[in-house]
């Protein structure tokens, strides 16, 4: 007579195992799940995003590049050896990317902490607070890449830039946005209530950068007491790199390294501060 061996699995073991596997998956890919949700949530204001990505560059290029450009070209023959439209186009791409990125890092971040409180819900899962912060930056960087790509296509269609190396303006625009947007996200994570802080950033940080960081004219033509605004602005460093890629603005290797290094350093510091402040807020 043969012996019969029975293996009895305790009730619920499979369910526990599946839950453990799902938790491990969240710990590994939680940042992407959050980023994916953030990108899908942008569908609620997709028309605004599309308008910002297409209409804004189109209007700026037509008004500044074509309208003002006719006056500038007629009087001075262009800037840096190229027509004004060619000169101003890279700066408009970079400044639009920076403004868009920065806006996404203000009220939407506060909403995640205060109004919707979805950051707390995500941090309560097997994911971590750091993943929530990384996801926000990843999602908005992807959006910025898309907007910069659309802007680049608009510039090509208007004859404001060419193909080839000028396509690298797309990641330069997104990197410039991250270099300013990440520090703003870190600051937004420290605010408990909405007040005048975001209005102050708009009026006394973004607007001065847009006007005085060399977007519409070379920074060297500004009085020395205003040039510092460009020196500390990701907008100017990104614009200089974009102009070198778009129409061959002569930059030495040291200058390229300086501009690129500034953007990478600012973005890195901003990301580290964002992760730190999200952790403090979500785990206290």
Image (cartoon, rainbow, N blue to C red):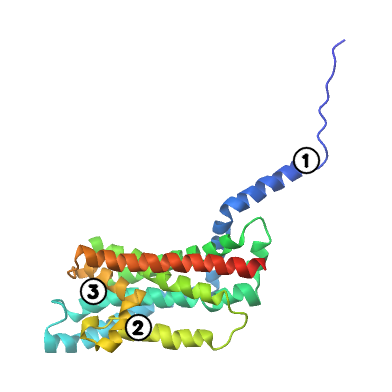
Question: Which mark sits nearer the N-terminus, 2 or 3?
Answer: 3
Query: Helix, strand or loop at disc 1?
Result: helix
Where residue 274 appears, as percent x and y from the top left, is 52, 68
Residue at the spot x=47%, y=78% of the render? 103
Q: CA distance from mark 2 to mark 3?
A: 20 Å
Image position of 141 (left or right of 246): right
Give neighbour class at mark 2: few <14, some 14-19, many 20+ (Cα, 10 Å): many
Give neighbour class at mark 3: few <14, some 14-19, many 20+ (Cα, 10 Å): many
Residue at the spot x=19%, y=68% of the render? 251
Residue at the spot x=45%, y=85% of the render? 202
Tell which tag, 2 or 1, sits nearer the viewer: 2
Residue at the spot x=35%, y=64% of the render? 171
Where residue 135 appears, as percent x and y from the top left, is 53, 62
| In the image, residue 127 above or below residue 1 | below
Question: Which mark sits nearer the N-terminus, 1 or 3?
Answer: 1
Which residue is denoted by mark 2 in the rendering?
A: 210
Which residue is denoted by mark 3 in the rendering?
A: 160
Image position of 53 (left or right of 252): right
Image position of 65 (left or right of 122): left
Tell which tag, 1 or 3, sits nearer the viewer: 1
Which residue is denoted by mark 1 in the rendering?
A: 13
């Amino acid at each position: 007579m043969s012996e019969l061996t029975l293996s009895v699995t305790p009730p619920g073991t499979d369910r526990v195992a599946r839950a453990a596997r799902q938790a491990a998956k969240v710990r590994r890919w939680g940042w992407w799940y959050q980023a994916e949700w953030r990108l899908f949530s942008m569908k609620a204001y997709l028309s605004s995003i599309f308008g910002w990505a297409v209409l804004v560059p189109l209007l700026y290029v037509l008004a500044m590049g074509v309208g003002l450009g006719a006056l500038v070209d007629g009087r001075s023959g262009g800037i840096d050896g190229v027509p004004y439209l060619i000169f101003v186009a890279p700066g408009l791409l970079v400044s639009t990317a920076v403004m868009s990125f920065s806006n996404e890092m203000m009220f939407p971040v506060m909403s995640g902490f205060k109004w919707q409180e979805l950051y707390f819900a995500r941090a309560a899962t097997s994911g971590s607070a750091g993943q929530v912060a990384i996801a926000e930056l990843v999602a908005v960087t992807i959006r910025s890449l898309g907007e910069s790509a659309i802007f680049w296509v608009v510039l090509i269609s208007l004859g404001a830039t060419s193909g080839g190396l000028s396509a690298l303006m797309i990641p330069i625009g997104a990197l410039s946005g991250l270099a300013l947007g990440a520090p703003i996200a870190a600051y937004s994570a420290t605010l408990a209530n909405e007040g005048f802080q975001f209005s102050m950033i708009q009026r006394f940080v973004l607007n001065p950068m847009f006007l005085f960081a060399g977007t519409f004219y070379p920074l060297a033509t500004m009085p020395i007491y205003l040039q510092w605004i460009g020196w500390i602005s990701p907008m100017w460093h990104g614009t200089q790199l974009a102009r070198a890629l778009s129409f061959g603005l002569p930059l030495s290797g040291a200058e390229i390294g300086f501009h690129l290094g500034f953007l990478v350093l600012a973005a890195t510091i901003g990301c580290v501060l964002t992760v730190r402040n999200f952790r403090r807020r979500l785990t206290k």
